[in-house]
Amino acid sequence: QVQLVESGGGLVQPGGSLSVSCAASGIIFRVYEMGWYRQAPGKERELVAVISSDGTTNYADSVKGRFTISGDNAKKTVYLQMNSLKFEDTAVYYCNARIRRTAAAVTPTLYWGQGTQVTVSS
C-alpha cells in the first residue's frame, strides 16, 4: 500500500503565511510527480501546484507568485509554502502523487492524501 500523509495547515489571517507538507510511504519504486489540489465548499477540486521528479513545476494562475512548491525526492515529500494568503485560498488541500509501486508495474498510479484544512480568516 501507498500512503500520503499531509501535515501543516490551520488558521491564518489574510496576508499571512502557512506551509503544508506531504510524505509518501509504502512500497514505492518511483515517484513521478507530486502535487497539491484544493477544494472549497461548494466548488470542484482544483489544481494548486505540481512538481515533477525532475523539478519542473506548474501552478494555478490564482497562486502564481504567492505559493511555492518544492520536493525532496529522497524523502518522497512535497512541500507547499503559501504566502500572502487570501480569503479565497480557504479550502481543504489535498496532496496527490503519481507513483509506480514496482519495477514490474506498467504505468504509475495516482494516489491521494486525506486532506488538510487551510482557513484564511480575520
Image: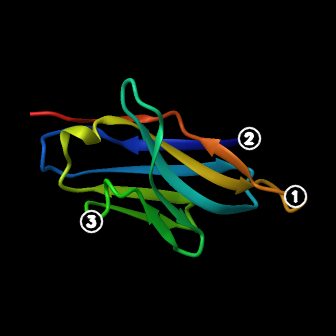
Q: How many residues crowd mark 1 within 10 Å: few (<14), some (14–19), many (20+)?
A: few
Residue 116: % across, % down: 40, 36
Residue 86: % across, % down: 19, 45
Question: Where 82 falls versus 120 (above or below)?
Answer: below
Q: How many marks?
A: 3
Q: Amino acid at mark 2?
A: Gln
Residue 52 placement: quadrant: bottom right
Pointer 2 residue: 1
Indicate the secondary structure of the residue bearing disc 1: loop
Q: Residue furthest top?
A: 42
In the image, taking residue 28 as reference, residue 71 lies left or right, namely left
Pointer 1 residue: 106
Q: Are marks 3 and 1 in contact (CB under 8 Å)?
A: no
Q: How many residues crowd mark 2 within 10 Å: few (<14), some (14–19), many (20+)?
A: few
Q: Amino acid at mark 1?
A: Val
Q: In the rendered structure, which disc, 2 or 3, sits on the residue that comes first in sequence?
A: 2
Which quadrant is the N terminus positioned in? top right
Camera-side mark, 3 or 1: 3
Residue 98: % across, % down: 66, 54
The residues bearing labels 1 and 2 have C-alpha atoms spaced at a distance of 17 Å
Indicate the secondary structure of the residue bearing disc 2: loop
Residue lying at 34% horizontally and 35% vertically, measured from the top left: 91
Q: In the rendered structure, which disc, 3 or 1, sits on the residue that comes first in sequence?
A: 3
In the image, taking residue 54 as reference, residue 109 lies left or right, namely right
Which quadrant is the C terminus positioned in? top left
Residue 61 placement: quadrant: bottom left
Pointer 3 residue: 65
In the image, taking residue 122 as reference, residue 86 lies left or right, namely right
